[in-house]
Image (spheres, coloured by chain):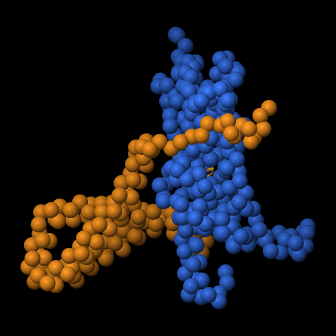
């Protein structure tokens, strides 16, 4: 039996040489247990060693292999060729990000935004609390449930690439950064909410979001960033009412 | 090796296509949802604008309300508003996080509650407000 093959049309862009990305088609053997990332690796090994793309874990954990597969943001290590076969598969760099080379995008913007929301536990008493034993902040299982879903984020940025608001306004803090801020705000051990709020509540923060909801559709970890954003809107609105009605009260 | 600043200036800047909202059904439905708000608001403004006429010339106002154009516009607006309400209530389950004791209320239950409250309110309005007018 003749070997079955599949076509992959892959975006190529050489900085300094190409004015804009072009697509190049490769025909490779088809295996129904291959994912798109395997196909790219095959092309790199057998056809063109200069093809550039990012990956690391090959198991949906590191979040570095995100690309557009047939126009939809996907982890390429989790996108099986069999879901597209026998049709050609179009692989492009993640939308909404500047393309550095081929399928590699510039993620600096997201990295800065992530740092801005302080995604770690903030305590007033860290300095004074005794170090070592006893230096622990206890949490009940139901308190973990309050934020568990939002802690599953692997920073793959598929949500940014699905978000038209981010596409039009790159200053928007974006789905994952807000979801992570929400994750720490909901953590019973954390006291940093007031430090995060100026960034989250700014005009480039939650209020840019018009609830298109595609971030939650494409998220491979069911983080549901859209829900985190809407919950944060509700929480800030409550804060505002409380500050009007009870100006003497402090959170 | 290019530095990160260098590679950034040489990077290809992606631009959002104008017709982005036609790229997927989700995006298109989102645009429709946003448009429904325009119809809702427009209907309310036009209705309010006719209130002075109702006071001055009730019969004239009634016939205006019954004109085919207004009836059609109202019907279309109603469909849009119903769609808007549908999307809004379905959103509530993911917005409201209420933990009763150890477990949070499921989003689907919250959504269902919204629709139930809506149904009850509609029935009450139909009985208390509309029926006396229709029956005379
Ligand atoms: S929220 Fe989901 S889609 Fe966005 S970066 Fe995190 S894991 Fe990826
Ligand atoms: S390679 Fe790590 S998530 Fe795909």
Residue closer to the observer: A188 or A164:
A164
Whether residue B98 is visible here, answered yes or no, is no
The answer to whether residue A161 is left or right of residue B89 is: right
The C terminus of chain B sits in image quarter: bottom left
Q: Measuring from the top left, give residue B69's x and y in whole percent.
A: 15, 62
Q: Colour of chain B?
A: orange
Q: Measuring from the top left, give residue A166's x and y in whole percent.
A: 56, 51
Q: Measuring from the top left, give residue A200's x and y in whole percent.
A: 63, 65
Q: Which chain identifier belongs to the blue chain? A: A
Q: Quadrant of residue A223?
A: bottom right
Q: Residue at x 29, y 66 (%)?
A: B42
Q: Measuring from the top left, give residue B116's x and y in whole percent.
A: 36, 71
Q: Is residue A4 above or below residue A99?
A: above
Q: Residue at x 68, y 39 (%)?
A: B9
Q: Quadrant of residue A44?
A: top right
Whether residue B67 is visible here, answered yes or no, is yes
Q: Is residue B16 above or below residue A87?
A: below
């Amino acid at each position: 039996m003749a070997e079955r093959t599949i076509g992959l049309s892959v975006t190529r862009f050489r900085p300094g040489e190409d004015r804009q990305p072009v697509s190049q088609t490769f025909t490779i053997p088809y295996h129904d247990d291959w994912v798109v990332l395997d196909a790219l690796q095959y092309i790199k090994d057998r056809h063109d060693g200069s093809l550039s793309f990012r990956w690391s874990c090959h198991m949906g954990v590191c979040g570095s292999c995100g690309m557009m597969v047939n126009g939809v943001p996907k982890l390429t290590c989790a996108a099986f060729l069999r879901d597209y076969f026998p049709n050609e598969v179009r692989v492009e760099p993640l939308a909404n990000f500047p393309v550095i080379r081929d399928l590699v995008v510039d993620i600096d913007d997201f990295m800065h935004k992530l740092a801005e929301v302080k995604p770690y536990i903030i305590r007033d008493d860290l300095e004074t609390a005794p170090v070592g034993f006893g230096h622990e902040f206890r949490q009940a299982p139901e308190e973990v449930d309050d934020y568990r879903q939002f802690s599953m984020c692997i920073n793959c940025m598929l949500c940014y690439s699905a978000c038209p608001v981010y596409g039009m306004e790159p200053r928007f803090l974006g789905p994952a950064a807000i979801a992570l801020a929400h994750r720490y705000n909901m953590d019973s051990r954390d006291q940093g909410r007031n430090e995060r709020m100026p960034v989250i509540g700014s005009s480039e923060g939650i209020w840019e979001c018009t609830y298109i909801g595609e971030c939650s559709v494409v998220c491979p970890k069911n983080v549901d960033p859209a829900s985190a954003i809407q919950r944060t809107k509700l929480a800030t609105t409550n804060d505002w009412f409380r500050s009007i009605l009870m100006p003497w009260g402090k959170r | 090796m290019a530095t990160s600043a260098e590679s950034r200036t040489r990077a290809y800047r992606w631009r959002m296509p104008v017709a982005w909202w036609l790229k997927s059904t989700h995006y298109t439905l989102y645009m429709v949802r946003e448009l429904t708000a325009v119809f809702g608001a427009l209907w309310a403004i036009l209705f309010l604008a006719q209130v002075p006429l109702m006071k001055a010339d009730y019969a004239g106002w009634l016939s205006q309300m019954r004109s085919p154009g207004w009836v059609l516009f109202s019907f279309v607006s109603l469909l849009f508003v119903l769609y808007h309400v549908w999307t809004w209530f379905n959103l509530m389950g993911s917005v409201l996080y209420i933990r009763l004791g150890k477990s949070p209320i499921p989003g689907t239950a919250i959504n269902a509650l919204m629709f139930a409250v809506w149904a009850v309110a509609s029935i009450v309005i139909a009985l208390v407000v509309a029926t006396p007018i229709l029956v005379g």
